[in-house]
Amino acid sequence: MANIKRLHPGIYIKDALDSLEMTAKEFSVRTGISERTLSSIMTGNGNITFDVAYKLSAYFDTSITYWTNLQNMYDLQLKEESKQQEIDTDWDLIKTIKSYLISYRYIEKTDDKETAVYKIRKLAGVNSLSLLNKKDTFVCLKEQHTQDVQHCFFQNFWIALALNEARKKKGTDYNKTKLKESILEIRAMTVQEPQYFYPRLQEIFDECGISFVLLPYLPKSNIYGATKWFSENNVMLAISNRGEKADLFWFTLFHEISHVLMEHRRETLINIKDVEDQEADQMAEEMLIPHTKWEDFVSKKIFTVNSIELFSKRMGILPCIVLGRLHKEGFLPYGRFDKHFNVSYQVTLE
C-alpha cells in the first residue's frame, strides 16, 4: 500500500534557492539567518524556529504561520510514525503483567494491543509505561524486599495504582490522636474474618484522615506496603496481600501505620535496611505483641501448638501472628506448625 508523506520544510527553502540560483551563503547575508542554521534545516537536521520563520516570511512575503505550519505538520507526522513504536514498547511491558491485569479486570482478554495500552496508561496515570521503567520514579516510603533494577517497572506500576486510588479518596485531615486511639481496636480485628473487619478498618482510616488503599500483590514488585504524604495533613497508606498470609497482612499494616505515626516524611525511597524501616518494624512488633509479654513467652522456650494457641488467645491476636514472629526471630524453623495456624486472605476488586 502506498503512503504519502510530508517533506521536511528545509526542502522548500532549498527549492526556492535553486529557483533563485542563490547560494545558502548569499541567502544568509540577505536574511540574517546564519549559514550554519540554513545548512542544518536544508539537510533535514534542523527545525524552523519562530525567528527563522519570521525572517523567511519577511523575505518571501509570506505569513509566519506558513513556515511554522510546515514545521509543525512535519513534526506531527514524525510523532505519528513513532506512535506505533511507543505502543509496541508499552505492550511489551504489559505482557509481563498481562495475567494480573486480566485477573483484576483492568483489561479484557478481547482487548487489542492499542486498547490495552491506552487503558493501562490511563490506569497508571502516565503518558508512557516506559516512564515507569526507571528507578525511583515515585517518591514514596515503601517496604520492599529487593533493590533489583529489573523490577522497577513492577514496583512503580503498583505504586502508581496505589497513588491514583488514594487521590480518589476525599476525607478529613490527618488526625494522629484518633489513629493512636484506634490501635487497640485495629489490633482486635486480627481475630475477625475479612468481611467483618475490612469495612470497619476502612471507616477508621477515613476518620483518621488516612487514604487507605489495599491492592492485590503484583508479582515481581516485591512490595508489601507504602506510605506517602501528599501534603501536611494528607497521607496515603497502601498495602498489598503479598504471600496472601494473614500474619504478613497484619504486620505490614502495623508497619505502615508506624511510618504514619512517626511521620516519616523524608523525600527518599526507603531501602530494606533503612533505619526508619527498622523503627517501623519495632513499633509494629510492640503494637501487636508488647515487648514484656513477648520476652516472658519466649523465655520459657516452650513452643508447641498448645502454647502458641494459649499465648495468642491471651494477647487477643491470631496464632499465625505469633508463629510468624517465632519464625522470623529463629525460635522455630520456617514451615513448622504452618498447617495448624496459617490463615490466608485474598484481595478482590469490586
Image (tube, grey):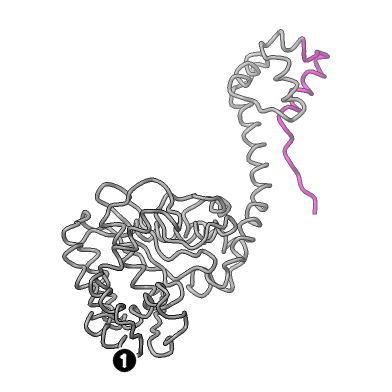
Q: In the orientation shown, which residue stands out farthest toward the front? A: 300
Q: Which quarter of the rendered picture does the N terminus lie within?
A: bottom right
Q: Which quarter of the rendered picture does the C terminus lie within?
A: bottom left
Of the pair 267 and 43, the residue shown nearer to us: 267
Residue 331: image quadrant is bottom left
User: Is 321 left or right of 313, judged from the image as shown?
Assistant: right
Badge 1 density bin: few <14, some 14–19, many ≥20, Cα 10 Å: few
Would you place residue 78 above or below residue 181 in this image?
above
The residue depicted at 46 percent of the width and 75 percent of the height is: 243
Q: Amino acid at mark 1?
A: Asn
Residue 202: image quadrant is bottom left
Q: Secondary structure at mark 1?
A: helix
Of the pair 177 and 303, the residue shown nearer to us: 303
Instruction: Estimate the x, y position of residue 261 in percent, counting from the top left.
Output: 25, 57
Whether residue 21 is in magenta: the answer is yes
Q: Which residue is mark 1?
A: 306
